[in-house]
Image: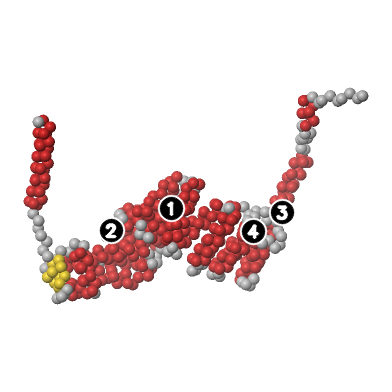
């Protein structure tokens, strides 16, 4: 019988299991790798050139045959030429170019339809690139006129798609955009409801920058529904989160702008001017002309409300101010001139002349309405100083306002106790009462009696404790 083979020793087992040692690569192997890398780079360059050539042809069609251009772009996007594009860089450029083409043609419905067509392709792309493409398409749709409802529909559909694909990062940003659109469309209840849900979710992730954006939309929404305390609280939360991270300059400028608006609503116009100035400088440096013009308007408003009308000319004629010369700035300058002349009638004429520019901005309209009422009251009190009994028609004639408005204003001032008098509407006369001169003796006597009472109570307590 054969002898059984001995079991292998542990060392032999290790040697058998260990792989054959790799031989060091020589110069020829290194050259092969370099050549392969160079070949890949050459291939990528060729693919990039091929995409660029197709894009140029599609762009040429925009002028020569505009109806064929969308299909040419779609052929590139869906890679009908079957080119190797692993990073989707060429297709991404084609998507953006097609979106820009639709913006030029003012075709918001086509941009919305394009988003739905792209979804099968987007599912295969990296999440970061997908988010960039979707956000860019929403931005392009916003550039078209009267597309708010389409934007809301597009955001709603995209949110549902994100939920199905479990793309939380993109969904949260699209929901933030949707809340902003609800605010623009004056759907305040829906905006607040969406923001409340979004805040709970984003606070758990501790995404500071997104929290700043959400709190700013919340601030504007509460301000729109005239809930100033909640608006101020949201602004404070936005500032707290902005201080914890590096905040982009334009977002910080937006925070400064709204800080100024809320300070102005609280009648702290000196503080509001400093906030508006900071916002204006940042928007001007960032070349955001529309917001820079808005900040400049609010700077002028702050000076007007501080009754420092003469300083508005320096702001308008400054080097940075001349860039934003427009009818809105002219309206503010005309109002400042009317107030400088102390002409109430001229003030109201300017408001009528620039009604569109003033009334389209609710913040400026609110403060100018307040200023107008203050001016009317001051003029009425100045006119009534020499009278104890005067016809309402005569007051209306002196103040150069309609009789009905003058009568309503007099009634309001009497009820608010700003005017001590009464209206005899039967004969159309205002009776002004003399202001009673209350001597200080009465107040002093009452204070003496009160102090004496406190002394007696103290003495009584001390006597009771010693008894």
Q: How crowded is mark 1: few (under 14 residues within 10 Å), some or many (20 or more)?
A: many
Q: Which residue is drawn at 64% across and 63% down?
A: 55
Where does residue 272 sit, x and y in percent of width and height?
34, 55
Q: Which of 459 and 146 is in front in this view?
A: 459
Measuring from the top left, give residue 118's x and y in whole percent: 62, 61
Graded by Cα atoms within 10 Å as few (under 14), some (14 to 19) or many (20 or more), the crowding at tag 2 reads some
Labelled disc at residue 215? 1
Determine whether, in the image, residue 272 is placed left or right of residue 200.
Answer: left
**Where's the C terminus, which quadrant?**
top left
Location of mark 2 (residue): 306
Viewer-nearest of labels 4 and 2?
4
Residue drawn 39% across and 50% down?
A: 236
Mark toward the viewer: 3 or 4 = 4
Measure the C-alpha gap from mark 3 to mark 1.
48 Å
Quadrant housing residue 461? top left
Q: Is mark 2 on a helix, strand or loop?
A: loop
- The residue under label 3 is 43
Residue occupying the point 45% across, 60% down: 190
In the rendered structure, the answer to whether residue 231 lies left or right of residue 132 reads left
């Amino acid at each position: 019988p054969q002898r059984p083979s001995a079991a292998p020793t542990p060392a032999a087992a290790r040697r058998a299991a260990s792989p054959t040692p790799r031989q060091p690569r020589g110069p020829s192997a290194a050259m092969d790798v370099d050549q392969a890398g160079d070949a890949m780079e050459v291939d990528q360059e060729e693919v990039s050139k091929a995409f660029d050539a197709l894009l140029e042809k599609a762009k040429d069609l925009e002028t020569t045959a505009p109806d064929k251009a969308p299909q040419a772009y779609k052929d590139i996007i869906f890679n009908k030429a079957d080119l190797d594009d692993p990073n989707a860089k060429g297709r991404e450029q084609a998507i953006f170019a097609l979106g820009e083409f639709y913006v030029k043609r003012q075709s918001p419905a086509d941009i919305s339809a394009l988003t739905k067509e792209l979804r099968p392709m987007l599912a295969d792309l990296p999440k970061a690139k997908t988010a960039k493409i979707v956000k860019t398409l929403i931005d392009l749709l916003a550039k078209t006129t009267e597309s708010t409802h389409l934007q809301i529909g597009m955001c709603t559909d995209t949110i549902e798609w994100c939920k199905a694909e479990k793309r939380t990062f993109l969904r949260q940003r699209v929901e933030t955009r949707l809340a902003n659109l609800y605010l623009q469309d004056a759907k305040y209840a829906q905006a607040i409801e969406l923001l409340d849900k979004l805040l709970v979710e984003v606070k758990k992730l501790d995404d500071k920058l997104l929290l700043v954006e959400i709190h700013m939309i919340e601030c504007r929404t509460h301000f729109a529904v005239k809930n100033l305390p909640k608006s101020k609280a949201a602004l404070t939360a936005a500032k707290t989160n902005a201080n914890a991270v590096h905040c982009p300059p334009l977002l910080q400028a937006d925070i400064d702008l709204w800080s100024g608006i809320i300070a102005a609503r609280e009648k702290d116009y000196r503080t509001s001017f400093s906030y508006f100035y900071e916002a204006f400088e940042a928007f001007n440096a960032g070349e955001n002309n529309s917001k820079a013009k808005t900040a400049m308007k609010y700077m002028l408003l702050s000076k007007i409300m501080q009754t420092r009308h003469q300083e508005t000319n320096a702001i308008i004629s400054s080097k940075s101010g001349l860039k934003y010369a427009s009818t809105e700035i002219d309206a503010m300058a005309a109002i400042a001139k009317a107030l400088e002349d102390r002409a109430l009638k001229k003030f109201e004429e300017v408001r009528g002349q620039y009604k569109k520019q003033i009334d389209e901005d609710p913040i400026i309209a609110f403060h100018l309405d307040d200023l107008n009422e203050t001016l009317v009251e001051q003029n009425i009190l100045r006119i009534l100083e020499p009278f104890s009994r005067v016809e309402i028609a005569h007051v209306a004639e002196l103040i150069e306002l309609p009789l009905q408005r003058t009568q309503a204003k007099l009634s309001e001032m009497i009820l608010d106790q700003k005017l001590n008098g009464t209206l005899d509407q039967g004969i159309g006369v205002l009776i002004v009462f003399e202001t009673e001169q209350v001597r200080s003796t009465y107040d002093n006597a009452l204070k003496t009696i009160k102090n004496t009472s406190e002394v007696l109570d103290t003495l009584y307590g001390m006597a009771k404790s010693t008894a």
